[in-house]
Amino acid sequence: MRLTVVLTVALTAPALAQDSPASPVHTYSIVAMDSASGEIGVAVQSHWFSVGSVVPWAEPGVGAVATQSFVNPSYGPRGLYLMRTGTPAPEALAALLRADPDSQVRQVAMIDAAGRVAAHTGSRDIPAAGHSQGRHYSVQANLMRNVTVWPAMARAFETTTGDLADRLLAALDAGEAAGGDIRGKQSAALMVVSGDPTDPPWERIFDLRVEDHPDPLGELRRLLRVARAYRAATDGDNFVAAGQIDQALESYRLASTILPDSATNGELIYWVAVTLADLGRVDEAIPLFRRSFRQDVGWAELLPRLPGVGLLRADRATIDRILREGRRE
């Protein structure tokens, strides 16, 4: 009965693309779920430009897909469609492989929101190629320098602490340390979504790409740090909207702690200052304004525009005071 259901669902989805790309996206990747938070994610590195535009796919409360080797990108949206409509990841992947006459040049992995995993390494993938599965994850690689890459990724994911993003990056780091792509490195990507199926399909916790870089994993880590800071700042905005000012200020301060002023050109600390000034706590705000003004004079130029659009309750005398004292060295 289950096989019948899978085939029926597969045939109701859009047909698999038959015109496969001529260029291979040989790479190593991981799909995984965090059993504590329910987060689902996929991460990848490759010696191929913009690997994040074709390999990783994920949807909140549904699952994640990595499609690589002689890549057919339609495995991403089709795999998510099948999992969204109730097909477990192993059966979804099996159905797509049956519909693909070129399945032996593919490498694909899927995980659904229940943590069920499936992977396929085609017999015509360029060695070293293989995959390994564990509880709530699958690691896979092709065109690697040696066969130790994907086992090293698996060990790193299993032994690393932290949230899902940290563990995904640890797996990529381990793959690189074990030998990585035989051609070298060029691009990387990380995508993490929530396990909540009520979240909109476009919602992302993290969606980061390094398109072309001499150290893509190092750059991806830097971007993750920036993304964490901006998520904290967004939490602050949401707390302000809900009237939870103490929580908002804590989130803003966390954001500015994660990143120094120079990394954001003063932006994060600026909005902490604006929030304080809006609350009438101008004495606390001025030192923060001063820090942001030092980074870029544009923040000072922006300040008088905020009252007119309802982002700062301050009269002209208060604005003048902030600008005067904020510009002092």
Image (cartoon, rainbow, N blue to C red):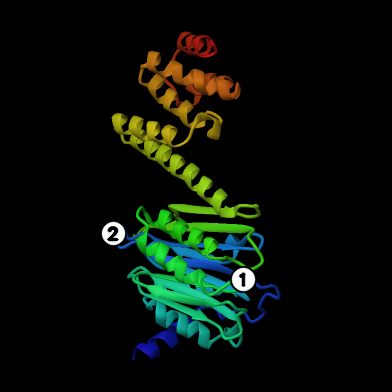
Q: Amino acid at mark 1?
A: His
**Mark 2: few, some, or many residues within 10 Å (few <14, many ≥20)?**
few
Tell me if I can see residue 53 in this picture.
yes
230 sits to left or right of 37 = right
Q: Position of residue 228 (x, y in %)?
A: 44, 44
Q: Which mark is residue 150?
A: none
Q: Is 184 drawn above or below residue 109 in the view shown? A: above
- Which residue is outermost to the right? 22
**Mark 1: few, some, or many residues within 10 Å (few <14, many ≥20)?**
many
Say which residue appears at 43% left-offset and 61% top-offset.
41
Q: Which mark is residue 36?
A: 2
Residue closest to the eye, 288 or 236: 288
Q: Position of residue 69 (x, y in %)?
A: 60, 74
**In front of the other: label 2 or label 1?**
1
Q: Is 257 drawn above or below residue 53 in the view shown? A: above
Say which residue appears at 49% left-offset and 71% top-offset.
150
Say which residue appears at 66% left-offset and 66% top-offset.
183
Residue closest to the eye, 189 or 285: 189
**C-beta proximity under 8 Å, tags 2 and 1:** no
Q: Amino acid at mark 2?
A: Ala
User: Which quadrant holds the N terminus?
Assistant: bottom left
Mark earlier in primary sequence (2, 1): 1
Q: CA separation, marks 2 and 1? A: 32 Å
284 sits to left or right of 17 = left
- Residue at the spot of label 1: 26
